[in-house]
Image: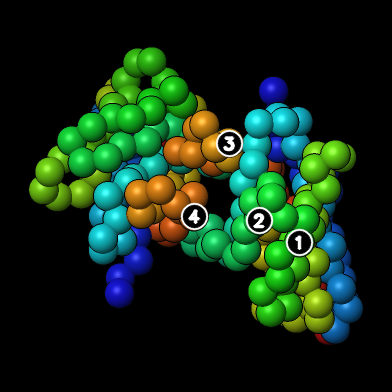
Amino acid sequence: DQQVKQNSPSLSVQEGRISILNCDYTNSMFDYFLWYKKYPAEGPTFLISISSIKDKNEDGRFTVFLNKSAKHLSLHIVPSQPGDSAVYFCAASALYNTDKLIFGTGTRLQVFP
Amino acid sequence: NAGVMQNPRHLVRRRGQEARLRCSPMKGHSHVYWYRQLPEEGLKFMVYLQKENIIDESGMPKERFSAEFPKEGPSILRIQQVVRGDSAAYFCASSLPGLDIQYFGAGTRLSVL
């Protein structure tokens, strides 16, 4: 049972344009969401997070949007840069069980010149 | 300020041998988590530990796998009598109490021959 889904395994975007990565979840108890970025042979690196009391959180070029009614969140990267090429994982946790992060399967982003 | 340190980075074992994976959390972090990533999949939660206590091991296989986080020294994930299906990347993460952001190490890639 995949509680966090990233339905696009890959995304290709031209440098300078916007990258939009999507994530859907099924568990209505999830109330905290994180995005991690992962390069090959490295561990995931924390990017940005959002709690369910907000619908938007912004940090530099990265913005995360949360639509609780649709159980959907998205990560926007603008402008995209070649160094953003990596695998992006969406993760979720529930207030009652904050020890466990539930990860999606990841989206591989490629930013080309 | 050193990040989460995992060693070894690569570990090769023959079927039936034991594998020991070590993790030193970030300075000041008392919570440690272990995740496993199979090829082309997301990270799957295994176990959550605090010093000398296992808090949640709901993701650990019932047999052959154990974890500890002693009062002194790193956290250890131990896999006895390894099988080929144990081949994966094992990631450790740490966090401060009460915060949901987990910071990951670079992982240990276990190959079982």
Residue found at x 69% / y 79%: A60
SS of the residue at dot 3?
strand
Where residue A23 appears, x then y in whole percent? 78, 47
Q: Is residue A48 above or below residue B88?
A: below
Tell me if mark 3 has few (under 14), some (14-19) or many (20+) residues whose alpha carbon lies within 10 angstroms of its own.
some
Q: Nearer the viewer, residue A2 or A51?
A: A51
Q: Nearer the viewer, residue B73 or A51?
A: A51
Task: Name the subunit of mark 2.
Answer: A
SS of the residue at dot 4?
loop
Where residue A30 appears, x then y in whole percent? 65, 37
State whether discs 2 and 3 lie on one chain: yes
Q: Amino acid at mark 2?
A: Ile
Residue found at x 18% / y 35%: B52
**Residue highlighted by disc 2:** A50
Q: How many angstroms separate mark 2 from mark 1 (CA)? A: 7 Å
Q: Amino acid at mark 3?
A: Ala
**Residue highlighted by disc 3:** A94
Q: Are the two marked residues, 2 and 1, in contact with CB atoms closer than 8 angstroms?
A: yes
In this image, A63 relative to B26: left or right?
Answer: right
Q: Amino acid at mark 1?
A: Lys
Q: Amino acid at mark 4?
A: Ile
Where residue A66 appears, x then y in whole percent? 78, 52
Quarter holding the N terminus of chain B? bottom left
Task: Name the subunit of mark 1.
Answer: A
Choose the circle earlier in sequence order: 2 or 1: 2
Q: How many angstroms separate mark 1 from mark 4 (CA)? A: 18 Å
Q: How many angstroms separate mark 4 from mark 2 (CA)? A: 11 Å
State whether discs 4 and 2 lie on one chain: no
Residue situated furthest left in the rendering: B72
